[in-house]
Image (cartoon, rainbow, N blue to C red):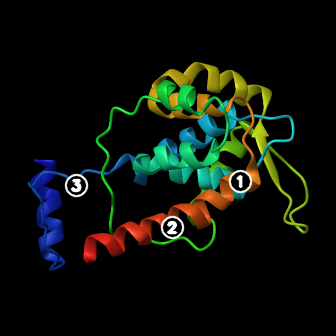
């Protein structure tokens, strides 16, 4: 009865009701701020040094977690020349099929997503992260708060693939080396591979 009244009211105002009975659109986890913010929490929890991490390093590591087909290349470059590289590769277990995305954007700078600031705010207002440093000097550092560390310990099992990859680096990642591999070495190897497949 109420529905009929509502429809009649809409019709009297020359408004047309449209009911979409098709299947709702599926939203990818990557498009959900909560999912992405949790992945940042995992990055900070696994690599949580007392000085925290820069936003650029978080963006680079997030890029690797989103694009798992570049993780082996990153491991090989990061641990190049170290005696334990075979051990690191054998500890890393990727259950995903390796697939090269030929449409990937070549990053000449850090793979920054405009939503990162929203995700940082999402975590900050929930007291899960702390931000130190100076924005003026572009020296902001993010690290888990005590609350964030507790929360991280409760949710890290939800992200086994990410944790498996990040465990390789211990509790500290070399920031300059990480940024260089993501912004220079991986894009160059991508373009070399792309040239081979086009010939």
**Residue nearest the viewer, comparing 26 with 20:** 26
Which label sits on residue 25? Answer: 3
Q: Residues within 10 Å of mark 3 (few under 14, many from 20)?
A: few
Cα separation between marks 2 and 1 = 15 Å
- Secondary element type, mark 2: helix
In x, y percent, where is residue 144? 75, 35
Q: Is residue 4 left or right of residue 154?
A: left
For the question of whether residue 114 can be seen, the reply is yes
- Secondary element type, mark 1: helix
Which label sits on residue 187? Answer: 2
Q: Is residue 24 left or right of residue 92?
A: left
Which quarter of the image is occupied by the C terminus?
bottom left
Q: Are marks 2 and 1 in contact (CB under 8 Å)?
A: no
Q: Nearer the viewer, mark 3 or mark 2?
A: 2
Sequence-first disc among 2 and 1: 1
In x, y percent, where is residue 50? 86, 34
For the question of whether residue 111 can be seen, the reply is no
Q: Is residue 44 left or right of residue 6?
A: right
Q: Is residue 167 above or below residue 134?
A: above
Q: Nearer the viewer, mark 1 or mark 3?
A: 1
**Residue nearest the viewer, comparing 76 with 48:** 76
- Residue located at (60% from left, 67% from top): 184
- Residue located at (90% from left, 54% from top): 133
In x, y percent, where is residue 181? 61, 57
Identify the image quadrant of residue 44: top right
Sequence-first disc among 1 and 3: 3
Cα separation between marks 1 and 3 = 40 Å
Q: Is residue 14 above or below residue 46?
A: below
The residue at which mark 1 appears reads as: 177
Q: Is residue 85 left or right of residue 150?
A: left
Cα separation between marks 3 and 2 = 33 Å
Identify the image quadrant of residue 17: bottom left
């Amino acid at each position: 009865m109420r529905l009929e009244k509502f429809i009649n009211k809409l019709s009297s105002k020359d408004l047309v009701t449209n009911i979409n009975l098709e299947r709702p659109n599926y939203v990818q986890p990557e498009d959900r701020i909560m999912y992405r913010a949790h992945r940042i929490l995992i990055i900070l929890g696994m690599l949580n040094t007392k000085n925290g991490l820069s936003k650029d390093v978080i963006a680079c590591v997030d890029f690797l977690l989103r694009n798992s087909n570049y993780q082996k290349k990153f491991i090989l470059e990061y641990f190049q020349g170290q005696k334990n590289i075979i051990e690191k590769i054998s500890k890393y277990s990727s259950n995903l099929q390796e697939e090269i995305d030929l449409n990937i954007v070549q990053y000449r700078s850090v793979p920054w997503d405009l939503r990162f600031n929203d995700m940082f705010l999402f975590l900050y207002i929930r007291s899960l992260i702390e931000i130190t440093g100076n924005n003026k000097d572009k020296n902001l550092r993010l690290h888990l708060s005590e609350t964030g560390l507790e929360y991280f310990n409760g949710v890290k099992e939800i992200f086994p693939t990410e944790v498996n990859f990040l465990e390789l680096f211990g509790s500290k990642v070399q920031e300059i080396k990480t940024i260089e591999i993501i912004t220079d070495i991986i894009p160059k190897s991508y373009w070399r591979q792309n040239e081979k497949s086009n010939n």
